[in-house]
Image: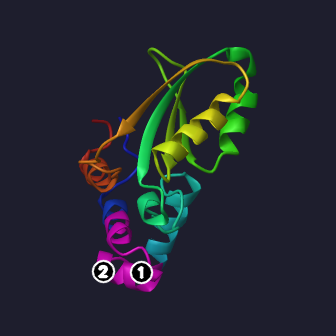
Amino acid sequence: MTTGIDAVDGRLLALLHDEPRLSVLELARRAGVARGTAQARLDRLLSRGVVRSFGPEVDPAELGYPVLAFTTLEINQSAVGELVAHLGAIPEVLEVHTITGPGDLLCRIVAHSNDHLQDVIATVLAGPSINRASTHIALSTPVALRTAPLVAAAATVPDGA
C-alpha cells in the first residue's frame, strides 16, 4: 500500500491544518524545507486531489443551522443522475454519498429547526425516483469530521507496507 505522502508532506499538511493562512515562505521555514520544495509539494498535493481547498472550515450551526440529520434514500437507479442534480441544488444538503446496505444514497442535511428540517426533507423527497427515505437526527457530535490524525498516520506508513 502506498500512502501517497511522506513525512515532509505530513508536516506541511499538519502546519496548514493548524494555521491555514500561513504563507508558503513561513510554511517552508516551519517545516524545515526550502520554499521551492514547499511550493512544489503543495502544488503536487493539490493536483493529486490530496488537498482539495484552502477555504475556511464553516460551522453550519454558527450560520444558524444547528440541526444535523442523515437521510438514507432508497431509489430507482434509472434516474440517479437527475436525483443527484436535484439534491445538489438544495443548499441544506451538505453531502451525498452512494452507499451499500439498506439504501442507495446517504445525505448529510442541516436545518434551522426541526420544522425546517421537515421542509428540507419534503424538498429532498420531491426529487425523482425515490422509493423510500429514512432520517436520523444527530443529537451531538462527539467526534467531528477530522483528517489530521489520518494525515499523521499516512505520513508514517512506509511505502509498500
Instruction: Say if the magenta span includes residue 25.
Output: yes
Instruction: Say if the magenta span includes residue 150.
Output: no
Main SS of residues in magenta: helix
Mark 1 residue type: Leu
Q: Is residue 100 above or below residue 39?
A: above
Residue 83 as seen in the image, left or right of residue 114: right
Question: Residue drawn at (32%, 65%), measured in percent from left and top?
Answer: 14
Q: Is residue 94 above or below residue 53?
A: above
Q: Nearer the viewer, mark 1 or mark 2?
A: 1
Question: Residue drawn at (57%, 35%), measured in percent from left and top?
Answer: 121
The colour mode here is rainbow
Q: Earlier in the sequence, mark 1 or mark 2?
A: 1
Q: Is residue 59 above or below residue 74?
A: below
The crowd level at tag 1 (other Cα within 10 Å; few <14, some 14-19, many 20+) is some
Secondary structure beneath dot 2 equals helix
Q: Is residue 102 above or below residue 12?
A: above
Pointer 1 with pointer 2, Cβ within 8 A: yes
Coordinates of residue 55 in the picture (x, y in percent): 53, 67
For mark 2, what is the residue? 30
For mark 1, what is the residue? 22
Q: Which residues are magenta?
A: 12-35
